[in-house]
């Protein structure tokens, strides 16, 4: 009996592979067989010649990678790209960003999310973890554009119990949405904007409903020191005493994680992961970065992220990957750490694990969802190739991504976006800018004063 055609076969590419020892390799002249949105097999190109498929992609000269994961961002904030520059963190929040965010409408959030998804698809990001407001609009954009996402409705204690309730309602309403491409989380903003009672209630809701938590904590050293001075505990210790570390939690940034916090994270009852967005730390002149090496030694996944484009100016995970490797070398004084292969591991499988998708995405292997990107290395800036991992991390750019695939569906082919009309989105945002940027009302959605 002749087997039915596969949905998609990608041929003549080099495939990034993962082994059982946290290492990566490359399988040359390979083919990827996709059926019903799932990787069925990785075989030789010669073997694939005998197979039939509804769609075939000849990826000669290209490398197939698992789709990148942006482990912490605020996608709609692309609308604020460049409006608050060269400012310390407190002024950035209080004088510009939080006053402007008080003007946001649900349509602004949708337009920003749509533009962000276009940017991420073009940069080879197939999944993003978003922590923001009016998240019903973001979920709708994810559904229509074909990406995968891990979404949470952010809240502050200043909103009263309604903020926490909305976060739970959103998580339950959209869990498993977009044909299974949406996973959800509870999303308290941070220990400095959400009090202990709200954090404890969030932990209880997470246990009751089987939901993870995504929040900012120990974002920088100043926060950790201020928490110690005022309360006698670090932000990580706050997470322990409120029960947040008893459930699965994704901690954004963590550049203020102290040595005293490491045993607490190691002994957490829940699955702990940290998302690192190094470009923003450099822009804010924070004195320390995410302690990637110490966390890795504890077995804690460190995923790569960009944060929002209002602080980072881009949603380029390739840049985060290269900066992570370079900053780790600089801060540890060891050129052997972080290697290009380790950086690729963080950008792929560790990032998938960080958002709870370690068994679903993050590698190209039988049974995994077919979230795949094809990277063209024929340009002058990537030739010649002596070390493929180093070329990908330190020479390739997001613009070298030719094709982006999620669940076996092609979202970008040969740099052409297939699911988002970028000029239309740019026009929508342009029309909204005068009202969106108006700060004459004097309002803020919150106060930053750690």
Image (spheres, helix red, strand yellow):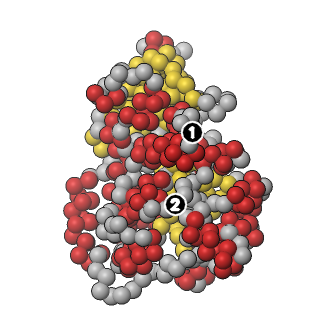
Residue nearest the observer in this picture, 208 or 282: 282
How far across and how far down the image is residue 229, in percent?
Answer: 66, 77
Label 2 – label 1 distance at C-alpha: 18 Å
Kindly state the secondary structure of the residue where label 2 is placed. Answer: loop
Left or right of 353 on screen, residue 265: right
How far across and how far down the image is residue 420, in percent?
Answer: 31, 51
Toward the bottom, the furthest residue is 441
The answer to whether residue 5 shows anywhere in this view is no
Kindly state the secondary structure of the residue where label 1 is placed. Answer: loop
Image disc number at residue 377: none
* Rendered residue at 46%/24% (across/down): 387
**Residue position for label 1:** 334
User: In the rendered image, which quarter is residue 310 located in?
Assistant: bottom left
Q: Is 162 drawn above or below residue 125 in the view shown? A: below
How far across and how far down the image is residue 53, in percent?
Answer: 42, 24
Q: Is 236 drawn above or below residue 38 in the view shown? A: below
**Circle 1: is it few (<14), some (14-19), or many (20+) Cα within 10 Å?**
few
Q: Earlier in the sequence, mark 2 or mark 1?
A: 2
Q: Quadrant of the N terminus?
A: top right
The answer to whether residue 123 shows anywhere in this view is yes
Q: Quadrant of the C terminus?
A: bottom right
Q: Is 347 drawn above or below residue 446 in the view shown? A: above
Left or right of 401 on screen, residue 326: right
Image disc number at residue 287: 2
Residue nearest the observer in this picture, 232 or 374: 232
């Amino acid at each position: 009996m002749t087997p039915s055609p596969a949905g998609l076969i990608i041929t003549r590419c080099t495939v990034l592979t993962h082994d059982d020892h946290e290492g990566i390799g490359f399988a040359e002249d390979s083919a990827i067989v996709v059926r019903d949105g799932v990787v069925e097999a990785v075989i030789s190109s010669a073997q694939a010649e005998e197979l039939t498929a509804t769609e075939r992609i000849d990826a000669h000269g290209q490398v197939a990678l698992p789709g990148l994961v942006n482990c912490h961002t605020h996608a709609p904030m692309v609308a604020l790209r460049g409006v608050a520059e060269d400012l310390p963190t407190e002024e950035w929040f209080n004088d510009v960003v939080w006053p402007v965010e008080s003007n946001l409408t649900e349509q602004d959030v949708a337009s920003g999310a749509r533009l962000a998804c276009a940017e991420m698809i073009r940069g080879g990001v197939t999944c993003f973890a978003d922590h923001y407001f009016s998240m019903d609009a973001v979920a709708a954009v994810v559904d229509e554009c074909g990406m995968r996402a891990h979404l949470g409705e952010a809240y502050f204690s200043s909103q009263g119990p309604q903020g926490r309730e909305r976060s739970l309602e959103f998580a339950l309403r959209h869990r498993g949405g977009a044909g299974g491409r949406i996973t959800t989380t509870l999303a308290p903003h941070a220990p400095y904007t959400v009090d202990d009672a709200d954090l404890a209630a969030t932990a209880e809701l997470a246990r009751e409903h089987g939901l993870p938590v995504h929040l900012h904590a120990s974002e920088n050293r100043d926060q950790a020191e201020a928490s110690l001075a005022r309360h006698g505990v670090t932000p990580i210790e706050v997470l322990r005493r409120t029960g947040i570390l008893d459930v699965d939690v994704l901690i954004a940034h963590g550049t203020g994680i102290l040595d005293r916090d490491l045993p607490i994270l190691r002994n957490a009852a829940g699955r702990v992961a940290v998302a690192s967005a190094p470009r923003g730390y450099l822009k804010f002149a924070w004195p320390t970065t995410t302690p990637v090496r110490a966390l890795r030694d504890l077995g804690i996944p460190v995923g790569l992220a960009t944060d929002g484009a209002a602080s980072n100016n881009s949603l380029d995970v390739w840049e985060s990957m290269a900066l992570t490797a370079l900053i780790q070398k600089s801060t540890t004084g060891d050129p052997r750490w972080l290697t290009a292969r380790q950086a690729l591991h963080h950008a792929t499988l560790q990032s998938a694990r960080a958002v709870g998708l370690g068994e679903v995405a993050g590698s190209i292997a039988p049974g995994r969802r077919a979230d795949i990107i094809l990277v063209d290395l024929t340009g002058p800036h990537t030739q010649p190739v002596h070390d493929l991992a180093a070329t990908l991390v330190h020479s390739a750019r997001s613009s070298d991504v030719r094709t982006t695939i999620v669940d076996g569906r092609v979202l970008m082919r040969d740099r052409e976006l297939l699911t988002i009309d970028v000029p239309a989105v740019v026009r929508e945002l342009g029309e909204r800018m005068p009202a969106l940027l108006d700060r004459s009302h004097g309002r803020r959605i919150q106060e930053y004063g750690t």
